[in-house]
Amino acid sequence: MTEWSPEELVTAYVDGELESDAQRRQVEAQLESSVRWRRQAQLERVLRRSLRHGVPGRAPVEVRDAVESMMSEAKGRAWTGWLPTLVLAACALIAVGMLVSRIPMSHEQADTIPMVEAVVEDYAARVESPLPDRRGMETHPTWAATASLRKAGARFVSGWRVHIRGEGAIAYAFVWKEQLVVQYVVSRELFLRQQVVRDAIDSTGAYTTEAQGHGVAGWLDGDRGTLVVGLVEPDDLLEVWQS
Amino acid sequence: MRWADRKRARFRVLVLPYIDVLHGYATRQVRDPDVASDLTQEVCLRAWKSLETLRDEGSVRAWLYQILRGVLRERSRKWARRRGLAAIEPLDAAVEASLVDDDAFASLIAQIDGLRAFEALQSIPEIFAIPIELHDIEGFRYREIAEILDVPKGTVMSRISRGRRLLASKLTLAAAANPCRKASS
């Protein structure tokens, strides 16, 4: 256990930060026994109060205006690595997307779907650090499942093996519409484990949801299930499925 | 409500209420309101981009300060603030003398007001000043400061304690150097 100096204990006492009754009793005995310690405590209180009351401030209105316009213009986390080459593709896809009619899908709360939570957690963890080397992933047997994304103009950037709900799965990362989207290829059994997913697949052929601010879209592809995750609207991800 | 609208709504509720305090903190760090405005906007932009990574909405304020500390660190060369450790011993002697002498202590307490305390805070090494600012001005708990600065909680406690002694010493020495500058209150 760390030994604190009497000065540090008085500071923590004044700030209400002592963690144990024993420490509190120790400091109170210290304060009772000596005017020097009582003065230190008083001095610290005066300093703290003076600083707290001495500093005013409101951000200039221009700052708020700038932030408001930033919010209006921004669309989310941009994936900037291949920006120049993707701008044209993104514009084309947006134009195509405007022409394609949207199919109403079932939106459910992701907190009831552990599989969705797991892929979103993996996505969130992956985008915070450099993506793994993609070498060899194009030869994996599940690579064919990414045909829709590739057809939609997405560019493959990385792939990795991952465990989703205790089962092995493959993740393929693509840049699509300037966003990083990851396709998780899972077993058909895992994909259809939840009733809400089965119902959505039965009625519309695809499942969409939103989890922790991420859009998720899923569909079946032969004997496998696919979940595409990205910081885009779930319905937008259906463009991939429709392509 | 569309996804982008929901994100905006979340941002408005979680982040916008802290613009004033972020700006105030940035201003105190760089001492230039215009630069502070740029920094505040930068923090908001980064917060917007990574809003999805914020899991615990209860810790949004500490999260924003963490972002601001990152922005400040990146630009710290530009506004190189006082660094390094102060020579503690002579200053300690000054404050110790005040603590054991009735008149000196009364004089020291009378000397302290918001402006002077803040001036003194600006003159001590930032390794001590930053935890004090985050605690005394911004109102963070030790645990939150430890998160923002990425140091153990015990380190926060030590730095605040040592920093306050430095502050008191600076004020003691200032009072001795400018005896006419006594607080009128």
Image: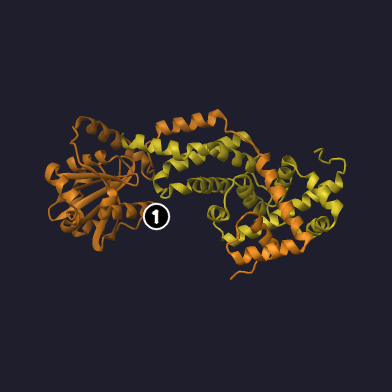
Chain colours: A orange, B yellow
**Which percent across, then down, holds residue B166?**
74, 54
Q: How busy is the neighbourhood of tag 1: few (under 14 within 10 Å), some, or many (20 plus)?
A: few
Q: Residue furthest bottom?
A: A1
Q: Position of residue A52 (x, y in %)?
A: 65, 43
Q: Which residue is mark 1?
A: A130
Quadrant position of residue A90: top left
- Whether residue A158 is visible, yes or no, is no
> Residue A13 vs residue A205: left or right?
right
Residue toward you, B72 or B98: B98
The answer to whether A177 is drawn above or below residue B106 in the figure is above
> Looking at the rendering, in which quadrant would you find the C terminus of chain B?
top right
Asked whether residue A201 is in view, the answer is: yes
The residue drawn where x is 19% and y is 43% is A241
Which type of secondary structure does the marked residue at label 1 adopt? loop
Rendered residue at 54%/28% (across/down): A62
| Image quadrant where one finds the N terminus of chain B | top left
Q: Nearer the viewer, residue B74 or A207?
A: A207
Where residue A148 sits: x, y (%)? 19, 45
Chain for disc number 1: A
Q: Residue at x 36, y 44 (%)?
A: A82
